[in-house]
Each structure stands twice: as C-alpha cells, then as structure tokens.
Image: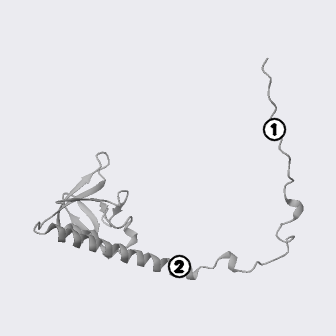
Amino acid sequence: MDEYLLQNRCTKIRVSTSDEHTLKVFSVFYQHPALIDPEGWTVLKTEENILVDKNTMWILEKHECEFGYEAKSGTILTCRIKPKDCSNLEAHWDDILQYCMEVKGDFAKFCDEDISLKMDNLKLKSDSKPGCSDPEANDRKLDSTLPVKEQTLPKKLSAD
C-alpha cells in the first residue's frame, strides 16, 4: 500500500485563539481538544494554519500530506498520507500501526484511571440511608396513588 487515508475526528471543532483567529482542528485520535493538555497541540502551517495534536503530528511528519475538505463548509474531513521514504513499506506501516495502538492504549488507560478516580469519590444515593423511613412524612401515602380503572374497548360505529 503506497498511501493511506486518515479520517479527522474533530470535524465539528474550531478553536479561537487569543488574537481572534479561528483554527480548524485535525486529529486522528481525539474527538475534542479538551481531551489532552493544551501543550499537546501544535499549529501545522500549510496553506492555512491547522491545529493538530502531537500524536497525529508524529504521523504527519513522516508523510507527504494532502488534506481533503468538505466542499460547502471547508471542514477538513481527511488527510491522505504517503510515506516520504518508500524503501520498506511493510515495515513503515507496521511502525505506524504500532504507534497508533500505543496511543490508543495510553488514552484508554488514562480514561479508565480518570473514571475510576471519579467513581471512587462518588456517593450513590442507594449507599446512603434514607433520612426518614416514615411514609407519611415524605408524602408516600397509600391513598395518594391513583385508583386503577378498568379499560373499556371503543365501540364500533355501524356504517349505514
């Protein structure tokens, strides 16, 4: 395989800079810039400035890149990459795949650790004892429920 098409996961994202420039975002790994530290992003200078995460940039630096845009909005949808060094394509693509698997694994670990830390600090309502066990005090009276009504079938209208 001589080339590969990468899909942008940040198609709906634009970032406004402090000097009031709006940058399009391209990432193969992350769906939103807030998923990694701000230092993990860099500006790729092409015909336009594009904000790219450091992991995607590692891949792009090893390839000749051609971005694919949506016709109406100018959103970056894809990037066609072609290796700069074509001497051993199989080893090249294996290295890229290995790198991608490591990034995905690291991100999954980060998310699992982050979620498990948040879950440890959560107190579920079912874990706490009810404040009052008297049904009268919290308006759970048996007579406050709606009575059960029998359902009646609609009558057929006779056509004359």
> In the rendered structure, which disc, 2 or 1, sits on the residue that comes first in sequence?
2
Q: Quadrant of residue 87?
A: bottom left
Q: Disc number at residue 57?
A: none
Residue, disc 1: 153
Estimate the x, y position of residue 123 in percent, counting from the top left.
Answer: 63, 79
Q: Are marks 2 and 1 in contact (CB under 8 Å)?
A: no
Residue 54 seen in this snapshot: no
Estimate the x, y position of residue 130 in percent, counting from the top left.
Answer: 76, 77
What residue type is disc 1 on?
Leu
The secondary structure type at the circle numbered 1 is loop
Residue extending farthest right: 143
Residue 85 seen in this snapshot: yes
Residue at the image position 31 percent from the left and 45 percent from the top: 72
Residue at the image position 44 percent from the left and 75 percent from the top: 111
Q: Quadrant of residue 134?
A: bottom right
What residue type is disc 2 on?
Lys
Residue at the image position 56 percent from the left and 82 percent from the top: 120
Please tell me how crowded label 2 is: few (under 14), some (14-19), or many (20+) other residues with Cα within 10 Å: few
Residue at the image position 34 percent from the left and 63 percent from the top: 16
Residue extending farthest left: 87
The quarter of the rendered structure image containing the N terminus is: bottom left
Q: How many marks?
A: 2
The secondary structure type at the circle numbered 2 is helix
Residue extending farthest top: 160
The quarter of the rendered structure image containing the C terminus is: top right
Does residue 108 appear to the left or right of 155 in the view shown?
A: left
Estimate the x, y position of residue 127 in percent, counting from the top left.
Answer: 68, 80
Q: Quadrant of residue 98?
A: bottom left
Task: Quote the CA–CA distance across marks 2 and 1.
Answer: 52 Å
Q: Disc number at residue 118?
A: 2
Closer to the camera: disc 2 or disc 1? Answer: 1
